[in-house]
Amino acid sequence: MTDDYETTLVQLAASLHVVHVAHRPLRTVSAQASMAEAHAIATSQTLNNLPVVDDADGIVGVIENLNGEIEKYARPREDVRAVRYAMRPLSDRMLIESQSSLEGMLVDLLSPPYYQLVVTAGQIDGIVTVADLNKAPVRVLSYATIAHLETAMAHAIRRLTNGDDESAVAALGDDAAAQVADAHRRLRRGALNADLLDATTLRQKGVILVGLGVFRDAGDRTVETEFKHLYERLRNPLMHMSPFVAESIDGLRAFAADLEQARHRTRQALAASA
């Protein structure tokens, strides 16, 4: 079961591209420059990876991890007479098209060299790193992912209970059901025409779907704990505008894992509502 809102959420996530977070214009250093010059540029611009250009201003490589921001990843050699002897030569692994999906880019940033040079119309004109994942378009991607999950869960619950919100909420137990009923009354007193299921939280919808046989606990972690974690990691930062991802590879991996888990649960909910 789908509706216009759900379709819009899917289209919104798909419309977010690498170009929306890329750092532009590129700040570069000459291949003939000294490492001291490279460090001076990187420090003044707060850059950890600095593209290297030849005499024709073409990108030929990148000086990586100049400021040591990526732990357990080699820093460039200092005992060289020119930057070109310490750079990583340009290769396809370092490149990504500007119109590639933002979601797909996460995979590319999970392994060395932990950044991507952005190509637009055949020209390298930007760079994207872990730090760029704190930008607004990534917040939009996170919102769309969680909103799609919650919408799919609501559809599945109504499909499996024939629209009986009261029986669905009753599966939460007396105390939780009473809390939902109280939240629903407050909404109605505020002249908001909300259904009972609309007053449940993301976590409560997850628990209801466990009772309906759609979701199962993953190992020692219950679905309730899982959804509490997803809410805190992906939805709370939207409200408080705190960063999703620390400037570290571990932070990026945790973020990517959260998004994938949310998509996995969305697929399960969609299958149940089909």
Image (cartoon, rainbow, N blue to C red):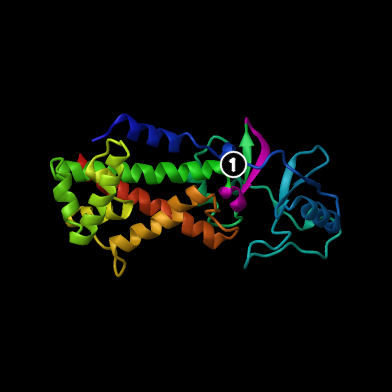
Secondary structure, mark 1, is loop
53 relative to 146 in the view: left or right: right
Estimate the x, y position of residue 59 in percent, counting from the top left. 73, 42
170 part of magenta stretch: no
Estimate the x, y position of residue 34 in percent, counting from the top left. 86, 55
- Residue 153 in view (yes/no): no
Q: Residue at x 36, y 51 (%)?
A: 262
* Residue ranking furthest to the bottom: 220
Q: Nearer the viewer, residue 227 or 81?
A: 227
Span shown in magenta: 121-134
Q: Residue at x 27, y 38 (%)?
A: 194
Q: Amino acid at mark 1?
A: Val
152 relative to 59 in the view: left or right: left
The total number of labels drawn is: 1
* Residue ranking furthest to the front: 189
Q: Residue at x 19, y 42 (%)?
A: 158
Q: Could you say which quadrant of the image residue 164 lies in? A: top left
Q: Residue at x 47, y 43 (%)?
A: 141
- Residue 268 in view (yes/no): yes
Estimate the x, y position of residue 155 in percent, counting from the top left. 24, 41
Classify 10 Å Cα crowding around label 1: few (below 14), some (14-19), many (20 and above).
Answer: many
125 part of magenta stretch: yes
38 relative to 229 in the view: left or right: right
Quadrant position of the N terminus in the picture: top left
Q: Could you say which quadrant of the image residue 14 lies in? A: top left
Estimate the x, y position of residue 98 in percent, counting from the top left. 58, 36
Whether residue 70 is situated above or below residue 99 in the rendered picture: below
Quadrant position of the C terminus in the picture: top left
Read off the residue under disc 1: 21
Q: Could you say which quadrant of the image residue 149 lies in? A: top left
